Image: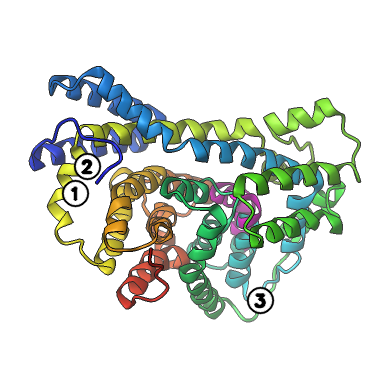
Amino acid sequence: MFRTEAKTIPVFWEAIIIVLAIVGIMSASIIKFDAPPHMPILIIITLLIIYGLLKKVSFQHLQQGMVNGAQSGIAAVFIFFFIGILISSWIISGTIPTLIYYGFSIVTPNFFFAIVFIITCIIGITIGSSLTTVATVGVAFIGMASAMDLSLALTAGAIVSGAFFGDKMSPLSDTTNLASSIVGIDLFEHIKNMAWTTVPAFIISIIAYAALSPKHATASLTNIEAFQATLLSTNLVHWYALLPLVLLVILSIKKVPALLTLAIGSIFGIALGFLHDTLSITAILDVLFNGYVSNTTNEDVNALLNRGGIASMFFTITLVLLALSMGGLLFTLGIIQSIFAKIESSLTTARSVITGTAISGIGVNTLIGEQYLAILLTGETFREQYKKVGLAPKNLARAIEDSGTVVNPLVPWSVCGIFITNILGVSTIDYFPFAFFCLLGPILTVLFAWSGKTLSKI
């Protein structure tokens, strides 16, 4: 059933106690002590090794379990390196600043919530980071909503929905790359397949935000105009800067492998950068590794552009490798198998397997509050079950994104939930009912499963 052979199988109640202990350690570390998720995972790995030794499992088998887990994420690691490079090159070329500039051009006070949703979608796809989108343009929109005396909860809901739409559908997103990699499918095939649930969620969301938006409102757009003026002053906003995006779309349509697509897009972006800036080879290599550094007078614009580079991926890469190593230990010790054996008998149809996937993704997000683990553990656990019911792997990738990536910001004690609340000043509970896109993700994936529509067979 599982790629990592279990060296021992604990009884069900023992496995449940271990899982609850893991949940407790993760939750207390992240929520109470504000620790980065790496630390509780390292603590859990140490405790699992001790548990394994007590169960007479050799250290060599435990170590091999960790190695097997980490190896499953190597493909994602290489993609993450190239994502960091692509982001840097697209700032040098002006692609990201130009997209942001034109996105702000459609802001008007009327239909405000719908416009907020659309622009955060555009920027989210452009930079591939939901939290960066929230922390930059999201803060600007909260300020505008406050000036217009509009609902901050609704504004925050639209910001979160748009940001996580981008996080889910962007080829630059670490979660999107992780989901496709852990399941073993092409990145662009994964994004294309996600459209079946993502597009309906997008349409429903934009209709809802348009309906809830004020039809007549007046307010100063000074913040947005300041953003645009600062972007123009960088000399990075040019029409030709959109060509790398066009190339990316063409390569994805041609089904060029993600790694090659990212590499080609990066080279093209660097080449375009020479049209409006003379950079030395030393400077380019520094930006590709350490990321772009913006020195404008607008700190929000600096926060938006100060990103990219291989170094910016280290946090994600180390977290992924640690989480996968922990997952490898859980499988080596038979903990996941013991729990899964109790429910496996009921997972005999496509609808039940996808429903189980959605419930698991929501459960890991709710109990542990970490979206990477929601993707990693759910993907690894259900991989073989999808084969048994004749479903293609891309169905699993879509289900874990619909219930893993977009659910995390809805949990008050999750990594994303805590971050967003601190940045926007709006509690998770307040914006929860207005994050329509995030709420629709797991609902639509289960509805499509039970209808049998859009499911790909092996």
Q: Which residue is mark 1?
A: 340
Q: Amino acid type of disc 1?
A: Phe
Viewer can see residue 218:
yes
356 vs 271, left or right, is left
For the residues labelled 2 and 3, the Cα–Cα distance comes to 51 Å
Bounds of the magenta span?
Answer: 125-144
Q: Amino acid type of disc 2?
A: Ile
Q: Magenta part mainly helix, strand or loop?
A: helix
Quick check: 110 above or below 284?
Answer: below
Q: Nearer the viewer, residue 376 or 434?
A: 376
Coordinates of residue 52 in the picture (x, y in percent): 19, 24
Coordinates of residue 424 in the picture (x, y in percent): 53, 51
Q: Nearer the viewer, residue 304 or 236?
A: 236
Quadrant holding the C terminus: bottom left
Q: Which residue is mark 2?
A: 336
In magenta stretch: residue 132: yes
348 vs 210, left or right, is left
Q: Select label 2 or label 3 by which is in front.
A: 2
Going from N to C along the chain, the mark reached first, 2 or 3, is 3
Coordinates of residue 208 in the picture (x, y in percent): 50, 77
Residue at 70% from the left image edge and 55% from the top image edge: 248
Q: Secondary structure at mark 1?
A: helix
Mark 2 and mark 1 residues within 8 Å of each other at the beta carbon:
yes
Mark 2 and mark 3 residues within 8 Å of each other at the beta carbon:
no
Task: Count all numbered tags in the image, as a single digit.
Answer: 3
* Mark 1 crowdedness (10 Å alpha carbons): few <14, some 14-19, many ≥20: some
Mark 1 and mark 3 residues within 8 Å of each other at the beta carbon:
no
